[in-house]
Image: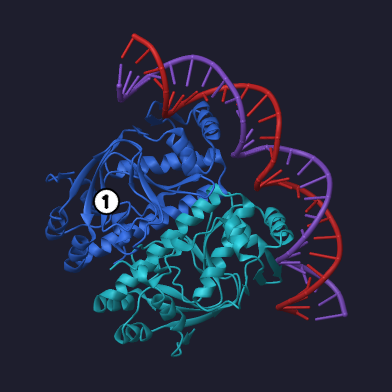
Chain colours: A cyan, B blue, C red, D purple
Amino acid sequence: MAASSSHDYAPLIRKLESTLQLTEAERQGIASLPLQVQSLRADQDIVRVGDRPSRSCVVLSGYTATYKVTGDGKRQIHAWHIPGDVPDLQSLHLRVLDSSIVTLTPSRVGFVTHDDLRVLCRAEPRIMEVFWRQTLIDGAIFREWMTNIGRREAYNRLAHILCEWMVRLRAVGLTDGSACELPMTQAELADAMGVTTVHVNRVLQELRADGLISLKGSRLEILDWEQLQQVADFDPTYLHQDPGEAAA
Amino acid sequence: MAASSSHDYAPLIRKLESTLQLTEAERQGIASLPLQVQSLRADQDIVRVGDRPSRSCVVLSGYTATYKVTGDGKRQIHAWHIPGDVPDLQSLHLRVLDSSIVTLTPSRVGFVTHDDLRVLCRAEPRIMEVFWRQTLIDGAIFREWMTNIGRREAYNRLAHILCEWMVRLRAVGLTDGSACELPMTQAELADAMGVTTVHVNRVLQELRADGLISLKGSRLEILDWEQLQQVADFDPTYLHQDPGEAAA
DNA sequence: CCAGACCACTCACATAGGTTAGCGACTGGC
DNA sequence: GCCAGTCGCTAACCTATGTGAGTGGTCTGG
């Protein structure tokens, strides 16, 4: 566990500003939150179902996911998190965690105490609103994932996940033209899609054969964005990324 | 469209108080929000995808649902709403609606302007927190539904939906012992479960044959709660109903 | 009091996706 | 420099769920 360095908050501030222009004072308020930084290997739980944490975590680098395990041991992944995300911000108002968070890759995460967050929210109401808004966007993404899992076939469902992944990474500057990192294993994709790894592999081969994507190791390249988006039935409105679209 | 009567807010206040004790001033603050009341028939959209509403709606009586339609016309229902719920509270901070809300039964809904809500939130910070908390609980329910749709078989999935329905109705006093109203059609259940109506009917017959439930018309009775809960893998933690569990 | 909807329900058949098992290529720890 | 584990990938077979078509009951608006 190490102290924070001055630019650890850069991804978070970038993310918040992608939906609402902050004042210098507001940026300062965030940047001066005390942050406990921790480096984790891949596949480590950060928090677990049933925990009652007194702090929330910020993803500084690397990738993580939220998940739940059913009574008979099947795992469902609910969300991916990328640098700048605060995956358990909800614990600020819900004491008991109803899901766990795990690293997908080696990651650096920072912890902010709920007390510090509450003080900041009281001092800067617009920051509170922007945090609230982030949790609402999380909810909007959950709704889209539910639709994806419940109503699209596996081929289109995977295409949808890839479209969303690309668009979210682009918003924080982690893409490289039409390519980006895809850090999750096929088993993790399966747990997000509600299918088996065998089937993920099948539809992945199909996407490749159809010339929509190339995936070598963890490097994903979108070869035909138009077609992929159409197959995925992907409309990015639900990501609420347009800063002009924050309610007044 | 009619003016509100004095006790229209009773279900909402009851719901909020089920998670946090309110002061008299706070209760007053809510009860004095101007409310535009509207009576709707079944199967009417209250708001639609793409709308930019300047007010949110409260369910006063009857039942409603949030849904999305995919490009090829399949519908996914994300949530049921019961009296006291504010199904589009998120539009307070997300200008564009990413899903629609429809009545399942004839209903009375009340509209509160976002301006009035913002004024109240500024005056009574605890009310803002309790509203924020409600949207976080919505998110927690989305996560559980995702798990239900992605990782449980239809038989168990339906059992889970019935367990949740019963527990939520009980919290607002709308149950009658081990029985309650189940106002949705099998087609609506299908859209919530991500299966076809034919299959809903099949697993419903199974639940009846196994002696777990009785469903006649829209009256649901749970015949064996223990067994149903076990089949459903139902753990109500995610509903965050315990008022002692609100974070400090 | 009729006509058209809608709803629960069923059947026969089709298929997307699950299951089980296994292979070779890497990789990180000792 | 080997061993154990993980990962992507494949094949053969199985089943939960979808599809399309239809029945009869009940409500409801004209």
User: Quarter-wise, where is residue B80 in the image?
Assistant: top left
Image height of B216 relative to B104, above or below: above
Q: Secondary structure at mark 1?
A: strand
Q: Residue at x 29, y 86 (%)?
A: A25
- Left or right side of B233 for A72: right
User: Quarter-wise, where is residue A156 in the image?
Assistant: bottom right
Is residue A69 at least partly visible in the picture?
A: yes
| Front in this rendered view, residue B133 or B245 | B133
Is residue B9 at least partly visible in the picture?
A: no
The location of residue B7, given as percent across then percent down, is: 14, 45
The location of residue B156, given as percent across then percent down, is: 53, 40
| Front in this rendered view, residue A55 or D4 | A55
Q: Residue at x 52, y 30 (%)?
A: B201
Q: Residue at x 38, y 85 (%)?
A: A31
Q: Amino acid at mark 1?
A: Cys
Q: Which residue is mark 1?
A: B57
| Front in this rendered view, residue B210 or A245 | A245
| Front in this rendered view, residue B58 or B101 | B101
Chain containing the residue with disc 1: B
- Left or right side of A31 for B38: left
